[in-house]
Amino acid sequence: MRFGVIVFPGSNCEMDCHYVIEKVLGQEVRYVWHQESDLRGLDCLVLPGGFSYGDYLRCGAIARFSPVMEAVRDFAARGGLVIGICNGFQILLEAGLLPGAMLRNNSLSFVCRFVHLRVENRDTPWTGKAERGQVLRIPIAHGEGNYTAGEGLLDEMERRGQIILRYCGPAGEVTPEANPNGSARNIAGICNEGFNVFGLMPHPERASEEILGSTDGLFIWESALAAAGV
Amino acid sequence: MAELYEELGLTTEEYHRIIKILGREPNRVELGMYSLMWSEHCSYKSSKRVLKMLPTRSPAVIQGPGENAGVVDIGGGWAVVFKMESHNHPSAVEPYQGAATGIGGIVRDIFTMGARPIACLDPLRFGDPSNPRTRYLVKGVVAGIAGYGNCLGIPTVAGDLYFHPCYEGNPLVNVMCVGLMRTSELIRGVASGEGNAVILIGNRTGRDGIGGASILASQEFDETSASKRPSVQVGDPFTEKLLIEACLELRSRRLLVGLQDLGAAGLSCACSETASRGNVGMRIHVDRVPLREADMEPFEIMISESQERMLAVAEPEKVEEVQEVCRRWGLTATVIGEVVEGNRLEGFWRGEKVFDLPADSLASQGPVYQREAARPSWQDEVRRLDWDSLDHPGDYNRVLEELVSGPNLCSRRYVWEQYDHMVQLNTVVYPGSDAAVLRIKETGRAIALSCDGNGRYVYLDPYRGTQIAVAECARNIAASGGLPMAMTDCLNFGNPEKPEIFWQFTEAVRGMADAARYLEVPVVSGNVSFYNETSGEAVHPTPIVGMVGLIGTIGKRRTIAFPEPGLNIVLLGETYEDMGGSEYLFALHGLTAGEPPRLDLALEKRVQTACIEGIRRDLILSAHDCSEGGVAVALLECCLAGGLGARIRADTSLEPLVWLFSESQSRFVVTVPDEALGMMESLAKKKDIPYTVIGRTGGDRLIINDWIDVELERMRRVRESALERLLA
């Protein structure tokens, strides 16, 4: 499987994603500069975390205008797999490839820690290797991960199964205490209606090796590999 | 001119020295440049002679002091680059930007050398948290570090945080950055090659930070300090991130002859230092410098401390390629001058020569002073402690709880969770242990990083207190399984023109030198921060030590956490009545008094090597050094980190309070499985170190004789929530 990791000015998790895809998953991977527009030959696009354009405006609000985003839109429209992690998720929201928006964390502080996530839907290319209700332990690191959307939209997303991951306690209980940023309905990760575009605040690349304290991120990577028939 | 030089902080003698060097009166531009470069902050004029005491070499040291940062070989063709700096005064005036630009400055020092920055550490000191201004400063500084460091994608993996009223008006905000590079990729801040281009990369030059080094960093504070806010620069981490990537690409493509960051004294410093190191001259076309404000004068342009700028030297035929790389990263790269034969630094402005002076007269031939040193008259007084006259509580559970819920020993999670401490996928031991451990993916090894410095001990005895700072930092490295390799420092003191302060400084450096030499940890870089005073009151003399250790095999790393039930808990080292300067005295009696703990460097070294060897042979499964709060606090921290209790039997003739909370040095709490106990004991015997089995891991309480019996879950809640509550 061939991955493309998109590099925006200010991305800072692109090397981490590249490392995990190449060294841990043993897959082909290349960087895609934000000014490129030719994505031929790639099976999965990764929009990595970081602070594209410094996030001086709203997170992801400038990166969405990068030339590569037109190509990403086409790629997604043709059913290609696209995953946006943290800042990548924010960019996908700004680009309208995923519904909803991000607010600052309700603590008003950046927060970096391991959290627990409950898998809400396993019928997606991103969660096929997990069980429904399975609890994953993966870190977050963000200042604006407070996901929000209109109540009606949220209900629709729930009905269609677009809510993929929710912040929860160690036993899977979805509680206000387990919500690290004030996200609506404890939402940590969502898909588009076609399920080929996935955005999540937690960093699966930081939980892909035993030595880093968790390998639960592999459920997500390996699900994508399986979905692509690898 | 007479008025101007005084206003710029130069003395009459210094002004005459300039006239002698130039053979004429300096003009306004030249005077501005000298005033900055000869400021204490840039010239080290008071500290230079004293710092010569420090050991700076070892077979592993590739680059010692004198460059932008020290470089140490970690094997396999890789090296670490590191340095510590202060941004105390800017942070006191404007905490967020002060701390943020502090990160920016130290990070530039690291990638200037050709290394990718892989970690930051932030030792912080503040006044009493009950003061609202302290809380404002702490929150602003932490947010500034987070805002800048997180954006760069450099993990902040360690640091420390202490409170004492002496830091009320003048907090300490020190920052250490560590970088990683192939030894073959070292770039030096040296200009050479007649005809080579001098290129300014990054931000435009503005009026921010004019005179930062002289006005902010080299003067005491008083009530008017708020008016100095315009001297604080404003950080732009996005541009800095682009600079990192662009400069590392320029390095990899071997397009540069030399590279230098612009920090204090801006262009004046970068041009004169690179020219001076390369024994060349430089011609600068000041009117080619891209400006934020068109009407800036040459003197402002030469001393502006606008952030996120780099000075590169490249061969003329490579200039276009350099500019192309920078353009790709969205940065401007402007040729502003050229390297010339000789030693003159010349500046031109619209066809007119605006400065002309010998480069090394700015960079390395500034005045050097032998300041007067005198032991303070109050020194003996503060060393006296009448232990028996104090009203000591008999409820040790309460003492323990007060200590670990107090500002100095409570959990720092509230702070380090605001820092991205995981990015780059190297952090294998997180903040909260004795040392952070980072894997080196390329070699299978790891490095351990720690910083330390107890200002109370140094205040009570600058010589011994500073020895302890070095010893404890090395002990933290050893507890994580690392062999201490080299150190950096940030020496935070008051006004060196006062004899007592200079005595503290001299004694501290002497202590650091002796400890560093004995423990074989050379000092490869560092920073001196004087004038940490408010309205004539100095902070405690606070030398901060930052150390790097090497863990030969990644698997041989340890944390403080008790790993499993049923292990023997062993105390390496001896407990004495070392209550002077202790956290117990400070937290429960409001006292900073007495003799700081004794320190026997020979024993310290033996205990550390025993710990390192015990870990290497897998006899030791967890290790924690005993420091502030003594063995009781150390044990509780091991319990909480592992989520596992312990039952301790202390067989001692010391009174309970002393055994529990004495801060005797050269001690570790380690865990040893039954089957390794014999071997651990003979290792201790071979190293000739005190060795006592004091208990066993297990349960959900910490029980020590009939002195202490606490429930862990409760202590965890108390300790974890304290800081946020104290700062609310």
Image (cartoon, coloured by chain):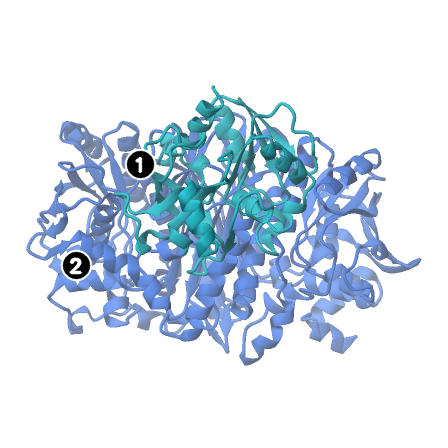
Chain colours: A cyan, B blue
Decide if residue B609 is on the left or right side of residue B424. left
* Chain letter for mark 2: B
Q: Is residue B472 visible?
A: yes
Q: Residue furthest top?
A: A230
Q: As displayed, is residue B515 above or below residue A206? A: below
Give the quarter of the image for residue A183.
bottom left
Callouts 1 and 2 in the same chain: no
- Pointers 1 and 2 in contact (CB under 8 A)? no
What amino acid does circle 1 point to? Gln
Decide if residue B175 is on the left or right side of residue B354. left
Quadrant housing the N terminus of chain B: bottom right
* Chain letter for mark 1: A
Residue of label 1: A134
| Camera-nearest residue between A3 and B456 | A3
Q: Residue furthest left?
A: B706
Q: Residue furthest right?
A: B351
Q: As displayed, is residue B341 above or below residue B300? A: above
Give the quarter of the image for residue B227.
bottom right
At which x and y percent is residue B647? Answer: 11, 46
Q: Which mark is residue B658?
A: 2
- SS of the residue at dot 1? loop
Decide if residue B4 is on the left or right side of residue A63. right
| Camera-nearest residue between A3 and B279 | A3
What amino acid does circle 2 point to? Val
| Camera-nearest residue between A43 and B482 | A43
